[in-house]
Amino acid sequence: MFGILGGGSNIFAGRRDPTQERQPPPLPTSIRFPSLSALTLDESSKTANGSSISNLQKRISEVRRPSDLKVDLLQSLNLKTTSDVAINDIIPCEYLPPVSWTNRERHTETELDNYPPADAKQLHNGREAPGFRDFSIRLREALVPNETGYDMLAGRTRPDANTPRLAQLRRFWEGLDGMASYWDTSQDEYILPKDKDPSDEQAAEENSSNAGGLDVKAQSPSTDEPRKRAKTDGLHSTAPPRVPSSRHHPSAKPSPVYPPGTYRGHRMSTGSEMPDTHRLDTVRCLIESCIWPFGLSIQPPRRPPLLLTGNLLTPVKLAYSVWRIPPERERAQQRWLEGPIFGVSCRSETRFETDSLESVVDGVSEVAAMLLLAQERARCGRVEKKPGEGQWWTERARWGGGLGGEIGDAVVDKVEVLGVGKGAESGGVGGLNDVVGRPKHPDGKPTVKRAVEAWKVLKPGVGYWDPKVVYEPIGRMKGSEYDEVFLVSALNHHISISKLRVHQQYLDAITAGEWPDSELTESEENMLHISRSRWFDLFLSEDRAEAISALWGLSTWLCRMEEDEEMQQS
């Protein structure tokens, strides 16, 4: 059911004691979030020719570095953003879990058995919608206190009547335990060094002189960490400092600050140094546990995620996409997918200032990911035009006429092999067929094409669509010209849900790269509406519960069955 955690997400699970003093890690990373308001321009910032989007493709191609994001590009996208939106304004209230489901008093084994079964609604894929029991099991595991969850993973605490067994969210808890080694500051305690006794200093000096004059006291605070000790053992502690590089990296992360003294707590390092795999695996396992009862699957991109703007392909940062599993067993075993339903974006940036360039870069990458999802959902009923399809260079053979002939024309008919008898030419015993071992057709031609023969085949290039995906706008309201695209974003140790509302005319214009000659107007079909919820802290039990409720409601809303389909099946 759940993907295997990669990158050692559970490397620290159960191996740290928050009550034991040890060398201090770097100071914790401050929590900052990007502002969507950085993407919205006021009237004073708009340029005279920025409202025309006929040169949008050119403006995108000119972006080489973050500083190339100019006002004209943001104005061409014509964005309208809203932050800290309530979940019931992003997802309809009737599809969110009812209030009775989120009541903690109901989440006991007795209540689960005695809870009256509701009328099972049918989903778009023919399954029955999951009920209270499926939701309650996940909510109970999400409400487990952090310390209790860590102890259960380490085997120091066993589940009882009040504490459920970690089953559906166990992989998530393992990833969260790994993230705690970088982000959990709930038990941080930096202990200042005590005043040194003169007798201790004298004894240390004597030991230093006995060691051949080596300064054994000078040690970096980070050398006590097991993962770094192997790199520092055997090095002279009085070695000259490394010469700094002459290059200037303005975007490089600042060097961590190690406070003096000792430390008690969960962290082994600071949040800005956490590997990306910890966040990727934790968010993936949380989403996977919520969408699995709906017959959905979360998968990384099997084709490079590229946003199409005319003949320009722009790489997009998209970690995962959620798809619907086909109901047919054979197609499901062949890894066919349907969708996409929504996307997941995990980003490792930690430094954001109010309306800063970092916020603009983060917002543009999020908008590009949602536009890519909208383009994939709009491929329903269309056929991909592969690169070079219909062009003369993929249909008509050509040769310049140089000396020596075309590559592959001069084929050696006879091969001299040492030790081959007279039957080599006839293909008898000990002949060439036995030596080479190449299978042949009845007419004598080899079954496997050689590299030269494969090179001579004229055909279009490999396309960018996944051949085992049935592209379909699942969850889109029938008859509507607008499509609502959802994206789960992950930053620091938080997640949020964003919604993009785009008109089909806007999407077709971006995909084709052909825009009307007229300037943009403030009409709804020419604007991108982006709404983002608040950020849910995965280290807070209440935020975890609210995030699970939001993901549950999002899956229910996108997998719903329309009224006309219900009438047809009834």
Image: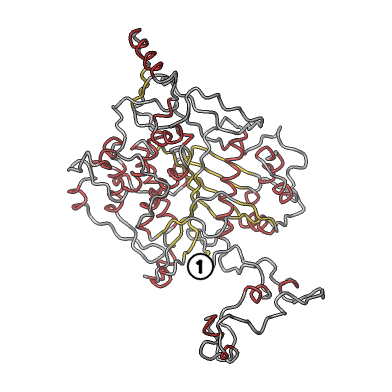
Q: Amino acid at mark 1?
A: Lys
Residue named by callout 1 = 468
Observer-nearest of 172 and 428: 428
Q: Is residue 144 left or right of residue 373?
A: left
Q: Is residue 541 left or right of residue 500?
A: left
Observer-nearest of 79 and 482: 79
Which residue occupies 44% across, 69% down? 334
Observer-nearest of 362 and 106: 362
Task: Give the quarter of the figure containing the C terminus.
Answer: bottom left
Give the percent coordinates (x, y) of residue 450. Answer: 61, 76
Give the percent coordinates (x, y) of residue 117. Answer: 25, 57
Give the percent coordinates (x, y) of residue 365. Answer: 59, 45
Q: How is the image coloured?
A: secondary structure
Q: Is residue 250 above or below residue 217?
A: below
Observer-nearest of 382 and 175: 175
Q: Is residue 409 above or below residue 474?
A: below
Task: Give the quarter of the figure containing the N terminus.
Answer: bottom left
**Quadrant of res 35:** top right
How crowded pointer 1 is (Cα within 10 Å; few <14, some 14-19, many 20+) is rated as few
